[in-house]
Each structure stands twice: as C-alpha cells, then as structure tokens.
Image (cartoon, helix red, strand yellow):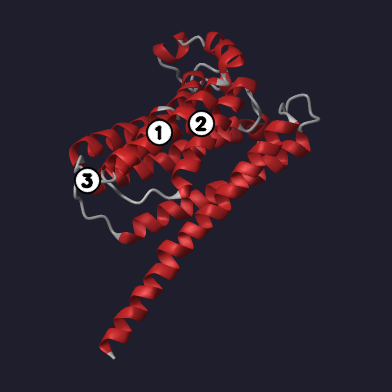
Amino acid sequence: MNASLHAFEFERQFDDRVWNEWFQKYWGTAFILSGAYAAGIYFLRVFMKDRQKLDLRTPLMLWSLSLALFSVIGAVRTGWYLMNVLTSDGFRQSVCDTTFYGTPITKFWAFAFAISKVPELGDTVFIVLRKQPLIFLHWYHHITVLLFSWYSYRDRVAGGSWFMSMNYMVHSIMYTYYAAKAARVRVPRPVALLITTMQIAQMVVGLSLLGLVNRWRDDVHCVSTTYNIMWGSVMYLSYLLLFCSFFYQSYIKGPAVREENERMKRE
C-alpha cells in the first residue's frame, strides 16, 4: 500500500474477514430484506391512501444530511485509494484490484457501502409518508443495488473500487441536494439535471468496467465470475435505460410540454 495512504485506527482495527465470512453464509438475507421492503412499502401506501400527507421536512433534512456526510467521507477514502492505484499501478490494475476489500484504508468503507444499502431503503418511507410520486426506477434501483452489492461483496470481485467510489461520489452530491431541498434552500434547477447526468455517466462507466473485467478475468489478478458480470451488466443496462428515460421525461419532454401549454394559452 502506498505510504501516503494513512489509515485511521478504526479502519485498521476493522476485521473484514469476519464480515466476509458472514456474507459468505448469509448474503441471501438481502432477498428477505428486499421482500420485506417491497411488502412494507405496499402496505404503507395502502395505509396512507386516505390520510393526509406528512410534512417531515426536518427529519428528511437530517436523514439526507447524514447520508450525505457518510457518502462524502466514503468517497474521499475510497477515491483516494483508487487514485493512488491508478497513478502507481495503472488503469488495468485499478479495474482488476481486489485488495480494496482488505486494505486498511478501504476495508471498512467497502463493508459500509454494502451495509448502507439497507438504511438507504428508508428514502422510500419518506416518499410514501409525504405522498410524493413513487416511480418504478426508485424502488427497483433500491432493491437491485442491495442485492448486487451484497452479492459482489461476498465474492470480492474485481471492479469494486471503481463501482463503490463512483456511487459514493454521486450519492454525496445527491443527498446534499435532497438535504438542501428539504431545508427549503433554493437550488438551481441545473443541479438536478447534473445529478441525473452523473447517474447516467455512472451506468455507462459501470457497463464499460464490467466489459473490461470480462475481457481480463483470465488473468489471475482479475477475479470475477460469469454470473457477477452477467447480472451486473443486466443491472447497469436497465439503470441506463431507466435513467435516460427519466432524463427525457424530466428535462426534455416536461419543459417542452409546459412551454407548449403556455404558448397555447397566450394564443
């Protein structure tokens, strides 16, 4: 490990082997959690159907702010490691690297990334209680990310440092945006467009990385499995299509329809 990568005491003390053994045995718990999440959201929507929406701005602000701070720290720690691997060992090694899961500076953050997909399910609770539109992309994304993150952490596959660093970075901006909106801070509309653009870029990069892992996985230093690459590709491709559709509906079609309606009213 590069000497410039200083690990804090709690990072060094974290026993990643214990948790990897747990994931080896119980990663399927993610299916139970996903099922409970889907059922819970369904019945919560039924419960809220004839009730007044809740404001919850302060709890939502604190919730989003906590996830933003967590994501910022995670992005800094994993991103710092990734940049050091890139500069010292090159791009191919950064893609194929699996020491990310056990290196002192990142082993805790790799674990925290996988576990964080459970509390992030709470985002949907705020949407339902505030009676905001719950789109397919939202709950589908939460379920599949939880399943794939636990599956990948179990196998410690190549590409993890890229996938986790990108997700931490995007979430650090996204949750900061949510916290600001909940606090009634006026955020320029282009910020929302930027976040969606970053999410689309993340899916393109994710698909590209999986393609490279598949190409290089015969190398003893580029460990992955056919199933991980296959399901990861399906997941990222579906996200890419859904986020592109969301971008079109929100930032192209939506404004165009409003402008057309305003023009017709003037005429």
Image location of residue 151, percent across then percent down: 60, 26
The residue that label 1 is drawn on is 121
Q: Quadrant of residue 72?
A: top left
Q: What residue is drawn where x is 54% and y is 26%?
A: 31
What crowding class fits label 1: few (fewer than 14 Cα within 10 Å), some (14-19), or many (20 or more)? many
Give the residue number, with chain letter if any, for mark 3: 53
Q: The N terminus is located in which quarter?
A: top right
Q: CA distance from mark 2 to mark 1?
A: 9 Å
SS of the residue under disc 1: helix
Circle 3: element type? loop
Which of pointers 2 and 1 lies earlier in the amino acid sequence? 1
Residue 254, relative to residue 74: is it above or below? below
Q: Is residue 250 at least partly visible in the picture?
A: yes
Compared to 240, does 65 lie above or below? above
The type of residue carrying mark 3 is Lys
User: Which residue is denoted by mark 2 in the rendering?
Assistant: 146
